[in-house]
Image: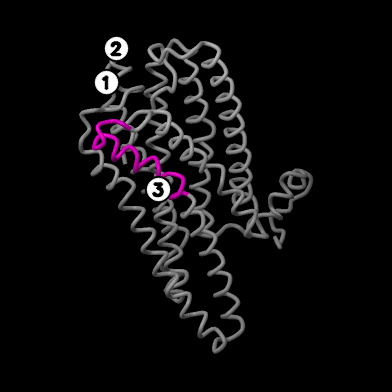
Amino acid sequence: MDSSDVVEDQLLFNESANVPDITAVTISYLLCIFGGSLSVLILFGNLLVIISIIYFKQLHTPTNYLMLSLAVADLLVGILVVPFSIVLFVKYWYIEDLLCKVRGSLDVLLCNSSIVNLCFISVDRYYAVCQPLRYRIKINVRVVGIMILVSWTIATLNGIIYTLKTPDKGQKNDRCFLFQKKSQSSIVIVFIGFGFPAILMSSIYLKILMVAQKQARSIQSMAKSTAAVSKVERKATKTLAIVVGIFLMSWTPFFLAISFHPVSNYTIPLHVLQTFKWLGWSNSMFNPFIYAFFYSWFRSAFKMIITGKIFKDDVSNSKLS
């Protein structure tokens, strides 16, 4: 999904915008505050998720390893993409061309990684709910490791392709700040990179919902222990479906906009496209809050980390409530 090949984020204000200096400075300050706060929230929240899954043995499950991979992608968005975007906005750097290329490559890489990871999480949930007897065989640590490797390999290749396609120095303004008017194939590119995975994930979760409803109707005929396990899996599936849903809601406006931007003869205001892009990046801070809200064991893990309990005693084998 080379969205940056279709469209590059343009600054809301540049030298030709004829915007009053005081307005440009004010918006620059506001963006720095917003972007800085967003970066800190992304960093703090996803760091909690990463430490929790790595440290607490109770969280060493195939599903959580996929969530760990997703958290790493989100963390890198907060550390690299958001700060680089702020710097490009305020235009304080003299190596703008290089920074633009790096930001674009990382943006493509991390967005791809998130999408592919979410697709694999959907597959994991499908087997957990729809084929529970085969779940332990089909989805194990080795298989999940391969899934994570594939997701990051695909993402890295897309990032490299974007970097190789970036024009030489001197053409940066056509690449970093202006939309590609020759990219009439943008709808196809976005569908392959975002639309198809979105349809795939939605279809899988729709199938899971139908199976879960059937299970709920027959739950009384199951053994109590089996029912309890099924309930846990359904709750995990519901939570991860919310993660996928929020991801799609965050990124869909941007990808729809850049798809139809060429078709509309580039009439969509640039500040609207920029806003949609920041909405997509903001998605990276949502997942830790979702986990804390729905999972009691993540809440317990977060509490132990924040209070420093994990640094005082070895609580890695603690039973998280």
Q: Residues within 10 Å of mark 3 (few under 14, many from 20)?
A: many
**For this view, does 282 lie left or right of residue 248?**
right
Is label 1 in a helix, a strand or a loop? loop
Q: Is residue 169 visible?
A: yes
2 and 1 marks in contact (CB < 8 Å): yes
> Which residue is at 21% across, 38% downward?
185
Magenta stretch containing residue 248, yes or no? Answer: yes
> Which residue extends farthest bottom?
221
Amino acid of disc 3: Ile
> Which residue is at 50% across, 17% downward?
90
The answer for how far apart the CA atoms under marks 2 and 3 are is: 33 Å
Residue 305, position as x, y percentages in the image: 71, 46
Magenta stretch containing residue 80, yes or no? Answer: no
Q: Residues within 10 Å of mark 1 (few under 14, many from 20)?
A: some
Amino acid of disc 2: Gly
Is label 3 in a helix, a strand or a loop? helix
Mark 2 or 3, nearer chain start:
3
Is label 2 in a helix, a strand or a loop? loop
Which one is nearer the viewer's eye here, 102 or 24?
A: 24
Would you name the residue on which mark 2 appears?
Answer: 170
The numbered dot on residue 115 is: 3
**Residue 159, located in which quarter of the rendered image?**
top left
The N terminus sits in image quarter:
top left
> Which residue is at 31% across, 31% downward?
267
Residue 139, position as x, y percentages in the image: 44, 64
The answer for how far apart the CA atoms under marks 2 and 1 are is: 8 Å
Mark 3 or 1, nearer chain start:
3
